Amino acid sequence: MPKGKPWSRKNEKRLREMVEAGASLQDMAKAFKRKPDAIRKKVSRIGLKVVVHKKSRKPRTTTSKIVPRGLLTHKKVLEVLVGAIKKATEPGLDKLEIMRLKVLVDAAKTYDSVLEKFEGWVQIEQRLLEMENKIGELQKAQNVSP
């Protein structure tokens, strides 16, 4: 059973918007009257990733969608692949079982390749968001200075 007060759908939506806007963990914690660790855990549970940038004076967050819970990690795919290979080495397998294992191996290899590409796109998206934030900061700095 989770500790603390439950999150309403309205607050979850607001939290998502704040994370996507780059709000700091401290700002979100104040806004929701919760601890920063509670905010970090909730953000993770709703499928977002918070990255804290410590180079600036005030830590800011950026977000990118992470691998949904239903997707296998590279490690899990490798475990499936190893299991299929081990099973294929057993004596006495019939032709249908060998074909099934071959399909499983091919699917695991394809899945891992697609997952790797997906993760690359997530990193690119994250870097673009960071650049957009920096451009915004530079534009504000140019407008503020005389």
Image: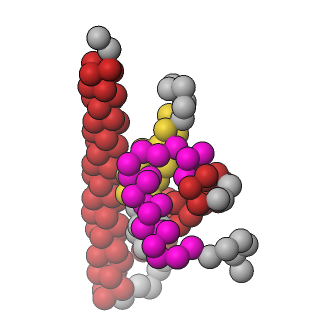
Residue 104: where, in percent of width, then height? Answer: 34, 74
Q: Quadrant of the C terminus?
A: top left
User: Residue 68 or 63: which is nearer the viewer?
Assistant: 63
**59 lies above or below 106:** above
Along the line of sight, the residue nearer the viewer: 125 or 107: 125
Q: Identify whether 2 is placed above or below 52.
A: below
Instruction: Please tell me which residue is depicted at 66% across the width and 59% down the height of the picture.
Output: 34
For residue 110, side relative to residue 6 (left or right) = left
Total tally of numbered discs in the picture? 0
Residue at 34% from the left image edge and 43% from the top image edge:
126
Q: Measuring from the top left, give residue 42's x and y in whole percent.
A: 56, 64
Q: Is residue 112 left or right of residue 69?
A: left
Secondary structure mostly seen in magenta is helix
* Front-lying residue, 5 or 80: 5
Instruction: Identify which residue is drawn at 33% across, 35% down.
Output: 133
The residue lying furthest to the top in this view is 146
Tell me: residue 26, above or below residue 133.
Answer: below
Residue 26 vertical placement versus 94 (above, below): above
Q: Position of residue 40 (x, y in %)?
A: 58, 55
Q: Which range of residues does the magenta coloring cover?
A: 7-28
- The residue lying at 31 percent from left, 64 percent from top is 111
Q: Quadrant of residue 35?
A: bottom right
Residue 127: name its quadrant. Answer: top left
Q: Quadrant of residue 70?
A: bottom left
Assess whether residue 17 is covered by the magenta stretch. yes
Quarter of the image with the N terminus is: bottom right
Give the image location of residue 65, x and y in percent.
37, 57
State whether residue 73 appears in this view.
no
Does residue 9 appear in this view? yes
The answer to whether residue 47 is left or right of residue 97 is right
Name the image colouring: secondary structure
